[in-house]
Amino acid sequence: MEEKRKISKYNNEYNSYLLRIVLKKNLWLIILFLAIIVLGIWAFLRYTQPIYQANTIIQLNNENRVTELISSNTFTKDNTLENRVEVLSSPEFIKRVIRKLPLDISLYAKGNILDFELYKTAPISIEYSIKDSTIINVPIYFKIKNSKNIELNYKLNGEIIQIKEKIGDTILTRHLKLYIIPSPDITDGEYYFTINDFTHLVRRYRNQLSISIINSNSGSVQLSFNDENPVKCVDFLNTVIQEYKSFDIEQRTKSARSMLDFIDQQLTALEQIMDQENIPNRSLDLLSDTFTSVLSIKQEIIKLQTEKELLNDEISNLKNALLVLENDSFNTSKLIVYLAQSSYYPILSTFINEYRLLIEQYASLSTIYSQNTTAIEQILWKIHYSKNSLIDVLQTLLDKSKYQLSTANKKIQDLQHIINSYNSNSFIASTMDETNISQPSTKYYEQFLDKRLEYTLYIAGIVSDIVVLEEPTLLTNPIYPNKTKIILMGTFIFLLLAVITLIWKYISYTNILSMEDIEPHIKDNLIITLPLFSGDLSKNQLVIHKYKRSLLAESFRKIKSHLLLRDKNIPQTIVVTSTISGEGKTFVAINLGGILALSNKKVLIIDTDLRRPKMSITFNNLNDLGLSNYLLGECNIEQCVKTTEINNLFYFPAGSLPEYPNEILTSHKMDELLENLKKYYDIIILDTPPIGLISDTTKFVLLADTTVYVFRSEYSKKEFILNLEKLKQELHPKELVVVLNGFKEKYIKRTKYGAYGYAYKYDIYGYYTDNEEKQSNTKKSMKKYFNYFYKKNK
């Protein structure tokens, strides 16, 4: 006996038709994946806080122009590029940068989902003093109303603090003191700010700053800084560059200045020793100057005269600035014009900018408040304090400049006296005779003077050799989220999910598609395919008499021919069953009865499914009296049998639902009913419950002349074939016909089973339904139109 093929739990064969079925059935899932991923990408790009990045390229050199003129190893220092880069990323240097920027407070505009930092664009400025350090890093929310009132609230240690004040008034809480100054473009809205922890800021911004060496030979370094605020990115890099210039000069002159301090101490000590040797100071000065050539002294005089002229201009500018502050203190433009020409402007710029900002704040507040309000009084007090501080600084600088001028005049006179003394040949000798100076002291003094000159020139020659090769510029698009990468990643995830889903659905698809799936297991029985009926079967499943020239009718005729044209007697009892509900056994039973009735056979269909009867619904009749009522002795046969649209076709409904259907169907009275009905009807068709679920059908299979077992294409599992094999082995039906219901017509035309009558094209003989005919006519009309249009254009 030939061994039967085993039924695999997974689909391990390629079938293009099956692939199309899987794709069609799961197209909604693929579309759902696509919709979810598109929506996710949109939401991620829309509601993710963008991060911007600014880049700059600098060149770090380590040169001193004086070392080229002085042949000494004193100034040689191992300061490699790696060491300088390490300084740029050090916490101490980041602290210097942060102190230069307004980062102590972060102010945000509150949005529905995203909050935006208002760096240098805030509608207010906030001055504060902390009473309790626990307030640091706590969000303090406030709402501006009518550009005048403010509602402030925050939560700390489980307690909610709420305050309502006017803008310009001092706000006091247990944790801090606030003074809020509005800007001219103040707008209503909801905001919040945090007083930042300095240590946290250093750690945060150090991580946001990245440094990479581009070329170690040329000293090229790229600095990158990323942040949620684009303006802050550029500002931070600019501040890094400026601070490193100052830091570089400070570090490189630090040791030289320490040596100068030491030399000055030694010179002072030597002067004291010479004083003890009764050497007059003037003679000592003259003695030290004798080691300088006349040409050098003249050059020094010219230099001092130039310095004298600059000091005169300096004094004039400082005096004019003081007059402006005393007579026209609000005219900051005139003040800046005078002080911008001063060499002290880098020192004064901080005081001037602070004073100018206070004047501008006063001008803006004057348009909102009257002169007697608290806000105006406080800003005027600040202006007065800043003005006095600036006057004190200017006066100190003026006194210093006057002292430097007098010192320069005295040096010029002394140097001129030395030149005049050189004209006397006896000057040096007389001086030596008078002073009785000791040679060691003179030698040491001379050496210290030389060293002092070297270190002074070294400090004067130090400048910051940082060259900005590329100014800090902001990238056009945010670095995060990267739109292109997110879309590519989303596309990859979609394709991956779609492919995995389709592969899994294909592998796990074990439904019966065609006779090829059934025939290897059922080789000794007739297998008939029924084309898929595309009409409406919800109201009436008896359609065989309406579509007589259809593939469906032709399939039922083949079953009829097999039943009526064989050598044996015509079967009087036919059982129609399936494995589970929904495979179309009722549809097959009704239309099989219809095709037999159209052949002048008197046919009765009995609905033996006493659990879920469908016959009455199909024929649009009430299921009041039927099989269950007859078996319980509640009615006779004449009351139960119903007529149909076809003359020779009758049906016996299931009746009311009994409590124990199995006991009723297996009763002796059911056998008597079948024997009695055979006297009046040529063929009796039993529409039974699914044999795979209920055992009621077993008895009818044993009594039936023919058993019709129904599978449904793309619905029934291949495992159901095992139930059919079990039925054959255990019940041994007299005649078995396998019906594959719902088979797709397109696949029928491609199948190789010509023996069953489906290899030829049915449109030659007119075997198609009315719907199919209309569809074919539509297709032909469209084809004709497109051919005409093509020829016309051609």
Image (tube, rainbow, N blue to C red):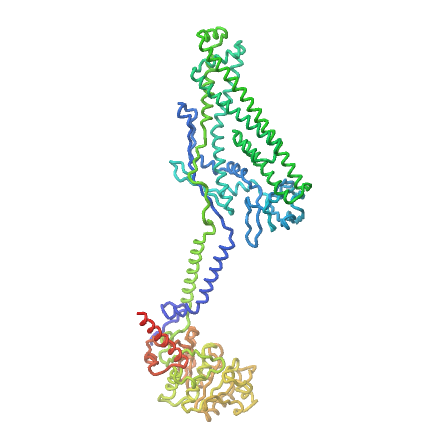
Q: Quadrant of the C terminus?
A: bottom left
Name which residue lies at 33% across and 81% down. 764
Quick check: 465 left or right of 145? left
* In the image, farthest residue toward the right: 372
Q: Residue 430 at x, y = what percent?
A: 47, 6
Q: Is residue 433 above or below residue 127?
A: above
Residue 295 position by quadrant: top left
Q: Closest to the observer: 615 or 664?
A: 615
Residue 346 visible in the shown view: no
Q: Is residue 475 above or below residue 246?
A: below
Residue 785 position by quadrant: bottom left
Q: Residue 786 at x, y = what percent?
A: 35, 72
Q: Residue 90 at x, y = what percent?
A: 49, 37
Q: Is residue 453 above or below residue 358?
A: above
Residue 749 visible in the shown view: yes
Q: Quadrant of the N terminus?
A: bottom left
